[in-house]
Amino acid sequence: MSELPPLVQDLALILVVAGFVTLLFKKLRQPLVLGYIVAGFLVSPHMPYLMSVVDKSDIQTWADIGVIFLLFSLGLDFSIKKILKMGASPIIAASTIIFCMMGLGVVVGHGFGWKQMDCIFLGGMLAMSSTTIIYKAFNDMSLSQQGFASTVMSVLILEDILAIVMMVMLSAIASGSSPDGGQIVGSLLKIGFFLVLWFVIGLFAIPLFLRSVRKILNSETLLIVALGFCCLMAVISTEVGFSAAFGSFVMGSILAETIEADKIIRLVEPVKNLFGAVFFVSVGMLVDPNILVGYAVPILILVLTILVGQAFFGTLGYLLGGQSLKNAMRCGFSMAQVGEFAFIIASLGLSLGVIGEFLYPVVVAVSVITTFLTPYMIRAAEPCYNILLNRLPKRWVRRLSHIQTGAPDNTASDNQWKSLIKAMMLNTLIYSILSTAVIALMFSLALPLFRRISVELTGSHWMGNAVCGLLTILIISPFLRSIVMKKNHSEEFKYLWTVRRLNRLPLVFTVLARVLVAIGFIFYVCNYLTRFKNALIIAIAVGVLVLMILSRSLKKRSITLERLFVQNLRGRDIQAQVSGRKKPLFAGHLLDRDIHIGCFDVPESSLWAGQTLRQLQLRNRFGVHVSSILRGALRMNIPNGSTILFPGDKIQVIGNDEQLSVFSAAVRDELQEEDTEIEKREMKLRQIVLTARSPFIGKTLKESGIRDKYNCMVVGVDEGQQNLTLITPSRCLEAGDVLWVVGEQTDLDRILALH
C-alpha cells in the first residue's frame, strides 16, 4: 500500500492537535484563536519532543488560502449601507485610533533600533484591535447590550475595512525603495478607483447572474459559485497590483448586498473555519522560543505600549467622535489588544520579504498577553474614570461629560445645498470611473484588433480608429448623460432654484462643471484617435453631448440601468422585508403621520385560527388594516376578506399606537380556554354488540348518528375474520353486528347504555 503524501500527514497532525487544544481552550473559556496558535507551536520544529510537520511550504499555501477565505467571510459581514448610516462619529474615532497607534508603533520600533520597514509594519500591526476577542469579552462580562459596546463594534468594523486598505498601502510601500507622499497618494487614488469600479460593476452584474440561475441553485452549487467568485476576484486583484486578500474582501462585500447573502454566509462558515484554523496554526508554527527569550524586553514594552496607547488614543478618538468622557474611556480601554489582522499583516510582510523573521513571533507573543489582559482593561476603565474625575478641573469634567456630536442645525437652504452637492459629486465620480474603465479597456483590447482588421481591408488604420471611437462613445454615452443630467430635476435643485434668485447662478455653474467633465471624456477619445484640430474636436464633443442629452432612447436606457442597479443594491433589504425581518420602506413615511406598522404572531391556540378576515372584522373592531400575512416562505400582500388565518401566521397591520396596543392585547388574549379535564380526552377502543333493542338496527351507519350525535367513530365490524372488515356509510346495521368503536369514555358510555 502506497504511503500518504506529506501534505495529508501534516494536515492530519495539524487538525488533530488543533482539535484537542481548542477543546481545552473552549473548556477554559479562552478565545479559540489562541488555541490554534498554541497548537501551531506544539507541531512546529521548535518543539522537539512532539511530532512536527514535514513540509512547511505546503502548510503556508493552505494558510494563504485561509487568509483569502477569512477576508471573504469578513466581506460578507460588511455592508456599504450600514457603514454610510453610521455617520461621522465612528469614522473619526477609527481614523484617530489607527493613525495615532500606527505612529506610536513606528516611534517605538525606531527606539529599538529596528529597520524602517519593520517599524512601519509594526505600526500597522499595533493599530489593529481584535473584533473576535472584544466581542467574546463583552458577552462573557454581560456588557454586549450596553450602549458603549455597540459603539465599539461599529469602530471595529471600520478598523477592519481600514486594515484592508492598510494592507494595500503597505504592499505599495514595500514594493518601492522608500515610501514618499506621491507614492502614497497614487496608491490611495488607485485603491479608490478600483474599489468604486468593482463595486459598481459587481453590484450590477452579480445579482443579475444569481437572479437568472436562482431556480437551479442549491446549497452545493451556490457554495461553489460563491467560492469561484471569491477566487476570481482574488486573481483579478493580484493582476492589477493588489493582494489576493483585498480582492476576496471586495467580492465578499459585493455578495453581502445580494439576496443570497445569508445563505452564502452559512455555507462558507465551515470552509472559513477549516482554512482559518490552518492559518492560525501556521502563525503558531513561527513562534520561536529563542526569539521570545531574546526579545523579552521589547515584548513587554510593546505590551505596555498597547495598553497605554489604546487607553489614551482610544479615549481621545472616541472623545473626538462625540462620546462623553466615561463612554470614551470604556470604549478605549476595551480595544487594548492586538487583533488577528496583525497576523495577516505580518504574513504579508514575510511574503514580501521586507520584515525580519523575529517580528512575527514578537507580535504573536504581544497578542497572546494582551488578549488575556483584555477583561482586566475593560474592568479598569471605570476606576480610572473615577480617579480622573477627581483630578480634572470641574469645568473640564462638565464639558467632557456633555459632548454633543455634530454642528448646530443649519438653515434648510444650507442643508439642501450640502445634500445636492454631495449627490452630484458622488454621481460624477462613479460615472467618471466607469467611463474611464470603458475607455481603458476599449483602447487596450479592442483598438489593436480594429486597427489590424482595418489595415487588412483598407491598408490604413483610420477606419479601425473610427469604429473603435464610435463604439467607445456609444458605450459611455449613458454614463456621460447621467453626469450632466442627474439631479437637475431633483427636489433639492427645484427648491434652491425657486427659494432665492441668488442660488440660480451657482446652480447653473454646477451644470456647466459637469458638462465640461462629460466633454472632456469625448475630447480625449477624439484627440487620441484623430488628428483634428482642438477647436474641431471641441465642436464635435459639444455636438455629440447635445445629441446625448436630447436622445429619448438614451434617457430611457440611463434610467433603466440606474433603477436596475438600485434594485440590486436593495435586494437584501427587500428580502428582509418580504420575510418579515425588517419593516417595509413605507413604514418610515407612516411614522411621520403617527401611524405605525406592527408584526404579530397568531398563537397556536388562537380563536382566530381557521377564520377568514371577513369573519374576524379586524378593521371594524380595532380600526387596523392588515397589509400582509407571512406563512413560512409565502408572503400574501393585501389579503382579501376570504383569506383564512392559520396558527403560526405573522400578520402585519397598520394603525396608530392605541389601535395597535388594543390589537396586540386581543391577539394575546383571544385564545382557546385551557382544558381542565385533559384526562377525559383520552381516546379508547370498545367492542359493541348490537342487540335487538339497539336504536341503530335498520339504519345505515350514516343515519345512526354514531359520529355526529355521539362523537364516536366506527373503525370496523368483526365478522369472525383475522382482520376487521371496513364498514361503508351506506351499510345497514343489523342485530348481532359486532362494532369496534373509538371515542372518549363518556361518549362510549352513552352508546353502551343503549345496548
Image (cartoon, rainbow, N blue to C red):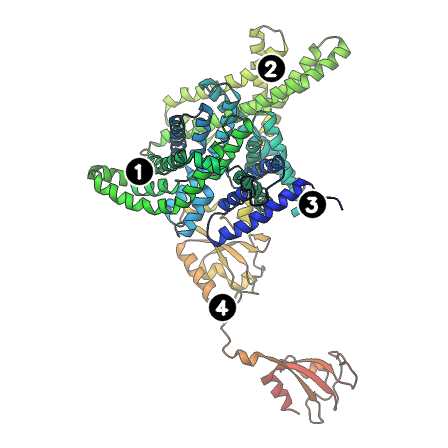
Which residue does the numbered mark 2 point to in the structure image?
A: 525
Of callouts 3 and 1, which one flags the residue occurring earlier in the amino acid sequence? Answer: 3
Mark 1: secondary structure: loop
- Residue type, mark 1 in image: Gln
Which residue does the numbered mark 3 point to in the structure image?
A: 216
Of callouts 4 and 2, which one flags the residue occurring earlier in the amino acid sequence? Answer: 2
Quarter location, residue 434: top right
Kindly report the distance in space between the C-alpha atoms of the residues bearing marks 2 and 1.
51 Å
Residue 457 is situated, as x and y percent measured from the top left of the image, at 77, 12
Query: Is residue 342 placed above or below 474 in the rendered structure?
Result: below
Kindly report the distance in space between the C-alpha atoms of the residues bearing marks 4 and 1.
49 Å
Mark 4 vs mark 3: give the one in front. 3
Kindly report the distance in space between the C-alpha atoms of the residues bearing marks 4 and 3.
42 Å
- Residue type, mark 3 in image: Ile
Kindly report the distance in space between the C-alpha atoms of the residues bearing marks 2 and 3.
43 Å
- Residue type, mark 4 in image: Leu
Picture residue at 69% right of the left edge, 91% below the top: 694
Residue 100 is situated, as x and y percent measured from the top left of the image, at 38, 30
Which residue does the numbered mark 4 point to in the structure image?
A: 671
Regarding residue 552, the answer to whether it shows in the image is no
Crowd band around label 1 with a 10 angstrom C-alpha radius: few (<14), some (14–19), many (20+): some
Mark 2: secondary structure: helix
- Residue type, mark 2 in image: Val
Kindly report the distance in space between the C-alpha atoms of the residues bearing marks 3 and 1.
53 Å
Mark 2 vs mark 3: give the one in front. 3
Mark 4: secondary structure: loop
Which residue does the numbered mark 1 point to in the structure image?
A: 404
